Image (cartoon, coloured by chain):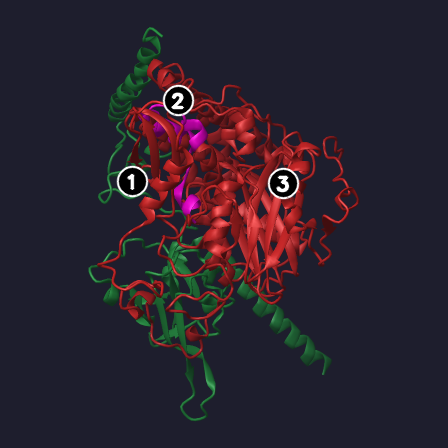
Chain colours: A green, B red
Amino acid sequence: MNGKGVIRGLGVVLQHFIDTYIVDIQARLAGRKRYYTPEGIAERSNYKARGIFTVQYPEEKLPVPEEFRYIPFLVYEEGPNGEQVQRCTSCGICAKVCPPQCIWITRTSDPVTGRPVPSPAEFIIDVDICMNCGMCAEYCPFDAIKMDHDYEIASYDRHRDNIFDIKKLSKPVSYYAQIRPTNYAREEAARQAEKEAKAAKKAGAAAAD
Amino acid sequence: MEQTIVTQVPDLAARFPGWVAPDTRPNFQGYLVQVDRLVDFARKLRDELGYDYLNSLTGVDYIAENKMEVVYHASRTAGGLGLVFKVQVPRDNPVVPTLTSIYRGAELQEREAYDLLGIRFAKHPDLRRILTWEGFAGHPLRKDWKEPFFEEDTKPFKSRWPNPEPVVRSEDQNPYSDNIQYPDDFQDPEKWVFEGDEAVYKALRRQHAGESDMETDRMIINLGPQHPSTHGVFRMVALLDGETIVDLKPVVGYLHRNHEKIGERNNWLGNIPFTDRLDYVSSMSNNFGYVLAVEQLMGIKVPERAEYIRVMMAELTRIISHLIATGFLGNDLGVFFTPVLYCLEERELVLDIFEAVSGSRMMCNYYRFGGVARDLPEGTLDKVRLLVNDRLSRKIDDIDRYLTENDIVQIRTQGVGVLTAEQAIATSAGGPVLRASGVPYDIRRAFPYSIYDRLEFDVCTRNHGDCFDRYLVRLDEIRQSLRILQQVLRDIPEGPIMAGKNTYMVKVPAGEAYGRVEGPKGELGFYVVSQGKPNPYRYHVRAPSFINLTSLADMCKGQKVADTVVILGSIDIVLGEVDR
């Protein structure tokens, strides 16, 4: 109880303080840019990081991992004439599984017969209610709803801007493939395999006939 | 597997004829106790059979049978199987004798059962509402209670698909613009006299009337923290004699959202992301407790790799939770933000791993019934390995060197907020609070779950029971968690991560289950009752930080006002879990 502990503790702080300069100077001498570059951010946020740890948002942004999830979006395929072909069949599984119940879906019905058509007429997500759990994306059997990476959705009027309709939610497959390459590749491979299995079955059935 | 400490639960029906009867409902455990014998039974249980620790107390509203049930889970800190016993009372006049005279840990839990279910506990020293506000109309967990803007009893709501109604917000449906029902005699919010505060003050004064022999005026003051960035919004009402605390009552509920009612409306799967929001710094542990409870009912065996992943995530969670506790203790001591930021730096690296694995830093939502949501992305194990082996242990030593020897920290924490082992057991304290008082009780050892029975680690204890020891126990536990992580990283096998298919249609057979894990803050228990429906019939959370608050008064008595801040910091509460 003679203040030695305090001084030793301050030594730890001093070490941290000096480190910030040493690391910066070392990086400069080695010609590495520690700030405002992706490499610099990676250097400052890995397990060996010393010195300045914080990131100057919004000038610098931490890269998000592939699994990062924020607000769902609807995946559409681009048709031959550039039209949007929704993968969604409006089966309603996402609306059922959604824990806070933030998804409202209207089914399209055939104008002539009145029968439901497997495509959504409207798809609304109240993003104020959405808790970003990702259950909709996890349980969608058609890979039609996926979680986005874009986390900057602040707006001025929540009543007007925070209810996302189908227009605002729809994004092309290419975007999905770009933000989640591994998942996309896996799903495409699975789909391809299924298609082949089906074709083989068909061929087998045809051969049997 | 050799079981050494686990002994048989004695046949209580033979031992207490006429008092108890086995609970014969299918998939239910334990005993039904006669209401008029409850107190005697509990006393004998504690004194003769050694069940000295009341884990959990809660009520269930069986509306179809017109009955209210109170469920008690007790166990022995010396080791051995747990015991469940229940009392049933008629629903229209639910009065149960209080067990606070035997297990003081029942105090806050009985208040909670009274508040949410309307079960009255006769002779309870201070039976007031605790989570909802004093003017609340009705008891929300009763099955016939409905809020004013009420959609349906259970999710999914029919208004969403296939013919949705326009998007409506409940707050727009009510003239007061929140979804609150006011009591019948409630006329005008402007003229309403708030009696809640007076009730707390009166309760404090009543309990200590005539104690002071001198003509000193005792003073009541309200203490914070009242800011979300501290521990949350929390109030302590302290009765002071000079600057010394005579007694203290925690006032909670500012963040109450009736998690349990939400849970009973959700389907089984939909509860997992909601458990994240309980103790929001350790969401992985919360997931773990809940899936364990439901898996007990479903009877699924989790694949080996999933078990390892689960334990790995739970231990990483323990590390970050203890880091936060340590850092913010520094904040409470006035070491403003330097230790917190050192701790948060390490936490950030762990959160990066959570983000890569589960998709979210804090609200992980990663565990599923029968496994985990997805396999670890490539390279995760290497990342964890580097973090555990090369960084965290070094940084823990750094924090240790920085704080432990610090004279000011020592003076402010040593001998402050002492909780003896007897008090800790009686008040059902859990986790580091209990173990810092010298009681080696850890759910990972007392009721081994997952793969903890084959992992090597020590149950850390300290003997003084003061704030300093609680801090040290946390540092010890971080080191033990690192030890566990090294074993997990060494042994983790390849293989499936899910038993069966990951489906949203979860079938849970009727029955009850109590799943518990050693969360970072103490025993985190989930009591669920299923009636075979897609949603739980009863869903109760045994929240460790809430129950740890029972011992707050014991720790604070005789201390100075400034010490309460440190004591509260050393308990490490998270208000998301306290208020639920």
Q: Which residues are magenta?
A: B553-580
Query: Which quadrant of the view contains residue B65?
Result: bottom right
C-alpha separation, residue under disc 3 versus residue under disc 2 = 37 Å
Sequence order check: which comes first, mark 1 or mark 3?
3
**Residue carrying label 2:** B399
**Chain of the residue under label 1:** B
Q: Report if residue B292 lies within the magenta region.
A: no
Magenta: main secondary structure: helix
| Label 2 residue SS | helix
| Label 1 residue SS | strand
Crowd rating for badge 2 (residues with CA inside 10 Å; few <14, some 14–19, many 20+): some
Under mark 2, the amino acid is Ile
Q: Residue at x 25, y 25 (%)?
A: A24
Of badges 1 and 2, nearer the viewer stands 1
Q: Residue at x 79, y 44 (%)?
A: B14
Respond whether the residues carrying marks 1 and 2 are from the same subunit. Answer: yes
Crowd rating for badge 1 (residues with CA inside 10 Å; few <14, some 14–19, many 20+): few
Q: Report if residue B579 lies within the magenta region.
A: yes
Q: Residue at x 71, y 58 (%)?
A: B25
**Chain of the residue under label 3:** B
Under mark 1, the amino acid is Gln
Of badges 1 and 3, nearer the viewer stands 3
**Residue carrying label 1:** B226
